[in-house]
Structures are given as C-alpha cells and as structure tokens.
Amino acid sequence: MESLNNVCQRILFLFTIIGLLTISLISVKPSLANQKNLKNWDSTKRTPPLLFENRKGAKFSIKTFRGNVIVINFWASWCAPCVKEIPSLIDLADSFQNKPFKLIMVNFGESLDKVNKFSKKLSSAKDVYLDKKKLSNDVWVTRGLPITYILDKKGNIKHVALGELSWNSPEVKKVIQQLIR
C-alpha cells in the first residue's frame, strides 16, 4: 500500500501537469484566420441592393464601387468580435491599395456621433460608412455581427464570412487576389 506521502506527490504532479497544459492552451493566441468562417456564396442568389452613407452624409450603393473587388463588413462598436477584426480589415485594404479593391465597413445602427468617436481609435477611418436606420437588416445582416461579404468586380457576392476572421491572412489575401485578376 502506498504511503500517504506518495499519493500526495502523485496528485500534486497531476495538478502540475494539468496546470501547465491549461496555461499553454490559454497563452496560445487564437488565430482569427478561421477559414471555416469564410464560405462560398450560392451563385444562384442575386446580390441584393445596399444603400449606405459616409460620415458626411453622402449616399452610396454597391454600384458606386463596381470595377473593384469589394469587401463589405457590417459591424458595431458594441460588438467585441467586430472591433477585434477591424485592424485586420484595415491591413487588408492597405495591402491592396494600388489594386482594384474597396473596403466598405458599414456600421450597423449606431449614431454618427458614436461612429465618429469610435473611428478616432482606428488607424484609418476612410472606409467607415453608416447604416443608421438598419436598412440592411434581414437582407445583408442576416445572422448577427460581424458579417462580411466579398464581391467580384461586377458586384456579385462570391464569399460570406459570419463571425470574425483574420482578413490579412495569406488564405484570405489569396481569395481576394484571385478575384482581382
């Protein structure tokens, strides 16, 4: 029969191993490049109309940016996953700045004042647009935020991502590059 001291040492050893495993799992930064969030769009579905405005009140639609590969991201400042992925969206736009590419980050349902305050925290706010009245609800914003669409140069939706994604990952950049060609 094992002594109480040996049993305690084994239990301590097991707790140490479990603790180390837990720490190693926690310290691994989860990758946003979760490719499973990026899905092919059903090509039989037509691209619905979308109206939005910039922070100065000028109105835009998808047609405004035809001829570019368009990434349309719907977000809100209260949405933690939205806020987390915005820097990678800006990085993506920066990496394609000399290509036929347009990033459209549409704030979903917040006031201009709130969007302006939030935009001051961003490295670039030039691609921030608004849908204050949530006109895109049930058509574009179908299952929560963030939701992002990738459109080809003709304005047809090709991919959709529900949830956060690392938009500056090599996998995503490859998808964009293929559409730019």
Image: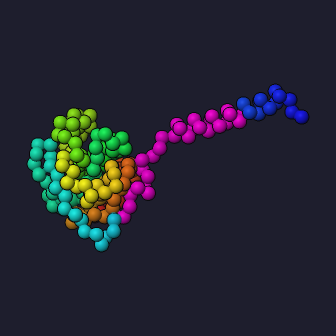
Q: Is residue 53 shown above or below 114?
A: below
Asked whether residue 38 is drawn in magenta, I would say: yes
Left or right of 122, for residue 65: left
Which residue occupies 62% across, 35% down? Answer: 20
Color encoding of the figure? rainbow
The picture quadrant where one finds residue 135 is: bottom left
The picture quadrant where one finds residue 143 is: bottom left
In the picture, which quadrant includes the N terminus?
Answer: top right
For this orientation, the residue located farthest to the right is 1
The picture quadrant where one finds residue 141 is: bottom left
Q: Is residue 128 shown above or below 171?
A: above
Res 96 visible: no
Considering the whole magenta stretch, tell me its main secondary structure: helix
Asked whether residue 82 is drawn in magenta, I would say: no
Camera-side residue: 100 or 146? Answer: 146
* Residue 2 x, y percent position in the rendering: 86, 33
For this orientation, the residue located farthest to the bottom is 44
- How many numbered dots are placed on residues in this image? 0
Left or right of 4, for residue 136: left
Which residue occupies 10% across, 45% down? Answer: 57
Camera-side residue: 95 or 139? Answer: 139
* Residue 120 x, y percent position in the rendering: 23, 34
* Residue 33 x, y percent position in the rendering: 42, 50
Which residue occupies 81% across, 27% down? Answer: 5
Left or right of 132, for residue 8: right
In the picture, which quadrant includes the C terminus?
Answer: bottom left
Res 19 visible: yes
Which residue occupies 86% across, 29% down? Answer: 3
Specify start and end residues of the magenta stretch as a single range: 13-40
